[in-house]
Image (tube, grey):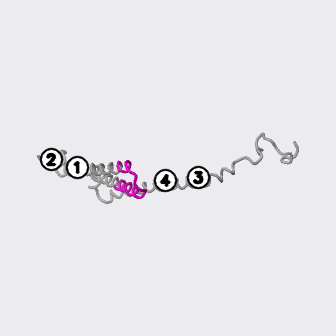
């Protein structure tokens, strides 16, 4: 069946996806399922056993890498970003990477601030305590006779 065009208009027939795209979607779905099963296996392995801290960090790093791989395939295949031109891909990916860096920087800075606050908290607490002897310097408390002159 041939489509008619009017004055330079291009019509695209709507229909079911071609066999190639069906195969690609099925292949990607199976790949994402396998990656998810591997991530779950690593998670259960970490939960059930007591590895050293180095091995734990290696497994967690592997899960992060696998998660990025899944995100890549989802965006590339199901959101069709893999079929776009390079400039459009960079327009989306570069701000996303800057946003991820922004979140990491804020978490790092917040953790540093928390550690410094906890380190110096005893010293700042002393500054706000009442003077020795229980006398208040402001308000309606006791006053020494020489503090404000005569009563």
Q: Earlier in the sequence, mark 2 or mark 3?
A: 2
Q: Is residue 146 left or right of residue 95?
A: right
Q: Residues within 10 Å of mark 1 (few under 14, many from 20)?
A: some
Q: Residues within 10 Å of mark 4 (few under 14, many from 20)?
A: few
Q: CA distance from mark 2 to mark 4?
A: 57 Å
Which residue matches tag 4? 107
- Give residue 118's mark: 3
Q: Residues within 10 Å of mark 2 (few under 14, many from 20)?
A: few
Image coords of residue 138 (percent x, y): 76, 44
Q: CA distance from mark 2 to mark 3?
A: 73 Å
Q: Earlier in the sequence, mark 3 or mark 4?
A: 4
Which residue matches tag 2? 3
Q: Which residues are magenta?
A: 44-65
Q: Residues within 10 Å of mark 3 (few under 14, many from 20)?
A: few
Q: Label 4's element?
A: helix
Q: State yes or no: residue 17 in magenta.
A: no
> Which label sits in the foreground, 2 or 3?
3
């Amino acid at each position: 069946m041939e489509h008619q065009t009017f004055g330079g208009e291009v019509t695209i027939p709507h229909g079911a996806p071609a066999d190639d795209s069906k195969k690609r979607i099925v292949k990607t779905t199976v790949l994402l399922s396998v990656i998810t099963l591997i991530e779950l296996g690593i998670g259960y392995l970490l939960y059930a056993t007591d590895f050293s801290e180095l091995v734990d960090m290696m497994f967690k790093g592997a899960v992060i890498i696998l998660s990025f791989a899944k995100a890549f395939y989802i965006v590339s295949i199901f959101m069709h970003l893999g079929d776009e031109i390079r400039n459009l891909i960079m327009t989306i990916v570069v701000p996303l990477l800057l946003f991820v860096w922004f979140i990491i920087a804020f978490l790092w800075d917040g953790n540093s601030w928390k550690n410094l606050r906890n380190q110096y908290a005893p010293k700042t607490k002393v500054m706000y305590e009442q003077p020795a002897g229980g006398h208040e310097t402001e308000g309606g408390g006791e006053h020494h006779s020489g503090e404000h002159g005569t009563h």
